[in-house]
Amino acid sequence: MIDTLDMEINIVGAICQDQKTVRVAAKYLTSDDFRSAPCAMVFDAAMEADSRGKLFDGYMAADILAGKIENPREFIAECIEICPTTANVEEFAKRIRTEAEERRLREKVGAALLEQKGAKLTETIAAICAEQIQGRPGGRMKPISGVLQQMFDGLFEKPTSRSDTGYGKLDSYLKGLWGGELVLIGARPAVGKSAFAISIAENAARRTGKTVQLYSLEMEDAEIAERALARHTETVTMDNLIDRNLNDDQGEEAARAMLDVAKLPIQIDDSANVKPSKVRAQALTEKNLGMIVIDYGGLMQSDRKYDSRNLELGAVSRDLKNLAKELHVPIVMLAQLNRGVGDDIKPTLRELRDSGELEQNANKVIFLWNIDREESKVGVTVAKNRRGRLGDVVMYFDGSHMRFTETEERYEESDRPKRKKRGSVYEDED
């Protein structure tokens, strides 16, 4: 580990001689990168003065340190004397930053070795190392001018952090799934939410070329493969695949579908007891990550212990929301609905099962329900949307091929079965 103290003193000396050099150093440094507390204080003060358009020099630097160190004027004079030229500020700033990152890496790994054990230790260290390799620094304050400029420049480019579902009408409401968003897909069992989520994952992988990581806590990976093949065939049904009963023509069609789907950058983890820490560790090792799908959140465990399942699921959703922001990818999590709601009733936000915090933490909430079982019509509603509109889409669900198709029909509220409240449970009215 290199000793950067002289470089830090050199940078402070340069700032005291030429205030503009703080802008050069600030491209690479924050005060947290300094080992010397007095140098960090001077750097922060110079940054604040420069941002306000005010003068900053050696006299002001000494005043900042008054009462915090002995002989502050002598310290500043020494900094200026050690710095014969301001030409080395950028190079010194880069080296200080590199040393600071290495120091923090050692500290994090050391803390993990002391605090963690077993699989948790491996996951934590893997995540720390991946974070270091990919250069994901902690958040920093940004001036709104820079944020606006970045947004304006992006108006003329195709967004790289947006993934569409592949369903035109639905995407017109959602305006895509964006990096940093936690998206919930809720339904009662057997409505098709797993098939719907898998189709979104596949469409995202196909359209963006980025990796989609799919966590299946409910199904084995072989079941997902069967659904993927059935979705891309016309004559091969789920019954054929499960029974392993295919004729020659069906076998050829299944082979063609397999070659097509195998090209997609989709990764599957069907292990049990998945926690947010494991999702984070594996996500950080993927350089071209585009989306994470979790089927489903109700089976996921928190990294911490809670007194109730409601609190635990709330913590899981918070961790996943934070992870979506850290990775700048959308995370899609499936959720069950309260048992008091029939699968032919259009759900509302209050019916998310286990935790009201799910709705609070989600950026977007999508619900599925049966409109007409005989005609295989499924309603898809956008019930919450922080970046888009609310609305309903009627889809046809072919269960034998696990395939959703949008229809031209409009869902009318009059089509919705009425329900009345009996105690705390809503039930269908005849």
Image (cartoon, helix red, strand yellow):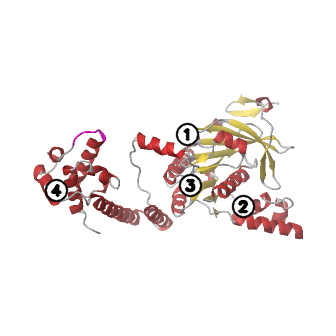
Marks 4 and 1 in Cβ contact (< 8 Å):
no
Which stretch did the figure color magenta?
51-55
Instruction: Identify the residue under disc 4.
Output: 79
Q: Secondary structure at mark 4?
A: helix
Of pointers 4 and 1, the one earlier in the residue sequence: 4
Q: Picture coordinates of residue 170 (x, y %)?
A: 70, 42
Q: Nearer the viewer, residue 157 or 337?
A: 157
- Name the image quarter holding the C terminus: top right
Q: Amino acid at mark 3?
A: Gln
Residue 197 percent coordinates (x, y): 69, 52
Residue that carries the numbered disc 2 in the rendered image: 224
Q: Please state which of the two labelled residues, at mark 4 or mark 1, is closer to the viewer.
A: 4
Q: Residues within 10 Å of mark 3 (few under 14, many from 20)?
A: some
Tell which circle, 3 or 1, labels the residue nearer the N-terminal end.
Answer: 3
**Residue designated by label 1:** 360
Location of residue 353 in the rendering, given as x and y in whole percent from the top left corner: 64, 43
- Which label is found at residue 301? 3
- Residue 402 on the magenta segment: no
> How far apart in space, not on screen, are marks 3 and 1 (Cα)?
19 Å
Which circle's residue, 2 or 4, is located before the other in the chain? 4
